Image (tube, rainbow, N blue to C red):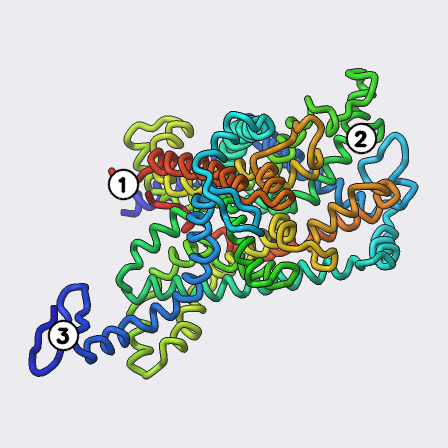
Amino acid sequence: MSTVINNKVINIGKKPSFNNKKAISKWLNKYGIGYLFMLPFIILFFTFIIIPVFVSIGLSFTQYNMIQLPKWAGLVNYKTLLTKDDIFLLALKNTMFFALITGPIGYIMSFIAAWIIDQLKFRNAFSLAFYAPSITSGIALSIVWLYFFSGDRYGLINNILINFGFIKEPVLWNINPKTIMPVIIIISVWMSMGTGFLVFLAGLQNVPKELYEAGAIDGIKNKFQELYYITLQLMKPQMLFGAINSIVGSFGVFDIAVSVAGMPSPNYAGHTIVAHLYDHAFIRFEMGYASSISVILFLITFILGRLSMKLFSTRDE
Amino acid sequence: MHIKYSLKKIKNCLYIRFKFKFSFGWFLVYLFMLLLVAFTALPLVYMVSTAFKPIDELFIYPPQFLVRRPTLESFTDLFTALDSSVVPFTRYVFNSLFTTIIIVSGTVIISSMGAFAMGKYNLPGTGILFNIIILALMFSPYTTQIPSYMIVNKLGMINTYWALIIPKLAVAYNFFLMKQFSSQIPDALLEAARIEGATEWRIFWKIAMPILQPAWATLIVFSFVNNWNDYFTALIFTSSQVMKTLPLALQTIAGGPGAIARSGASAAATFIVTLPTILIFTIMQAKVMKTMAYSGIKA
């Protein structure tokens, strides 16, 4: 809609009128530079993130080896994946087991640590010590942990356990299928405690101190009531951010698993969804089949992400 | 009034004394935290200490946790002995450093530009775009790898630095973080500059960027850490040894046949890979802490 007042074109409402060139150039003048600023990000964001998600979904219904054109396959990939591919089911089980342990442990530990550190002296030193593991390279530190878990007598943990008489023979931590997952989990928990930690700590520091005083007047007796009735309610946005981070991180477990157990790992005990995806996509080049794996991974993280959005929603307040 | 004032003063004194008073509960809390710090710090201490161990201490039995006679042997071993192999270690350092620096600068610029425009120009349609970006925070980065690989492959960028850089420039989180800040730039400041005839480009660089400094300083830290440690991108986009980055090279040095002969070199390499991220975080810690409060997602 446009109205002419004093021979000037003035746009009313949001939609610009393209009836005349003047309006277009006016619209461009007003918004053009803004869109231009956003253009580089938008192009790359759509090319490498948004469009690929849809392409993945499309490819997952085909058979495609990157040489011939994709062949429509309907639901065959998903059927094979979920009923016939025992290794995928094992990878799914491993990843679920891994995520169910490291996700919540890392999340809760980092929240408790942030909550305690926020009340301590030497806050910066404590937070650095606590955060440092999560900014180290997973590959580099799994090498260090492998010295600890080395399968011979030189391994620090074997050495201690033998000295104290718990075991007689050294345990082959990263070769025995029974101990591979626990080792991967220990290393990942150690690294994942920083996920969300900084956001939690920063969020805690931003809770207005007056609220605690007001709470004390309203009958809040101890630190734990304070935590539940005041702090947690105000930290929902940070809690949500931490939750999404830890979901995406724990279902994407790959590099630590590979450097601890190798690929393929003994009895596939350290095989994960991403490892399976990598195997089919970039070793066998079965892009259609691999896409169906990535769609399943996408659905898992996305649905859990939406659930946490519901859980930590601030909208109804 | 006077009495009231002194009462308040006494109360303050009491509060301070209470706070500093030794209490068994706090002692336990500190003890618990120190144990936790020991758990997080021990592997790092072991890594630093091992990197400086002479060869005989590396293989001593029973294994020693701390170094006794520190030397730089392992480092010279890493840079000279491995230098004679097909690809020198310095090449991996260069690959990692080069790609990381380009990605970090690129992502800081395009995210700041975009977020500034979205936060300050009231552009139609950006509300939906921002919601899409929030949803993209929930995408596992691995789900986009296959189509990204196909695009990079089509563009003929496999085994080039382009492949390691371009797909990683647009990150939903980076845009999100900058957007949280850019909305707070005061409009009056921008208007004043416009009246004085500054171009939008100039306004962005001279006014917006200095105000956004704590945000992009934080972005530098996170982007550096993520890309320096990234393993998957180089794994799928490069096949030639010359193009590998540090995490991949480290895996080659530390694993496979001859790994024991190289344990000194691999300890030194581990140290070199780990050091930069911890350094950059330590230097920027104060800024990062200030910014992180804005990382919450309101849903």
User: Splitting the image into 4 quarters, where does residue B66 fall?
Assistant: top right
Label whose residue precedes the other's in the sequence (1 or 2)? 2
Q: Residues within 10 Å of mark 1 (few under 14, many from 20)?
A: few
Q: Chain of mark 1?
A: A
Q: Earlier in the sequence, mark 3 or mark 1?
A: 3
Would you say the residues marked 3 and 1 are in contact, meaning their CB atoms lie under 8 Å apart? Answer: no
- Helix, strand or loop at disc 1? loop
Q: Residue furthest right?
A: B56
- Front label number (3 vs 1): 3
**In this view, A178 is above or below A118:** above
Residue under circle 3? A10
Residue A159: x %, y % from top left? 81, 26
Where in the figure is residue B276, as x and y percent of width and height?
67, 55
Numbered disc 2: what chain?
Answer: A
Residue A155, numbered label = 2
Disc 2 crowd, CA 10 A, few/some/many (<14, 14-19, 20+): many
Q: Quadrant of the C terminus of chain B?
A: top left
Q: Amino acid at mark 2?
A: Gly
**Other residues around mark 3 within 10 Å, as few (<14) / some (14–19) / many (≥20):** some
The residues tagged by marks 3 and 1 sit, at their Cα atoms, a distance apart of: 36 Å
Camera-nearest label, 3 or 2:
3
Please state which amino acid type lies under the numbered disc 3.
Ile
Q: Residue at x 76, y 40 (%)?
A: B46
Q: Nearer the viewer, residue A222 or B14?
A: A222
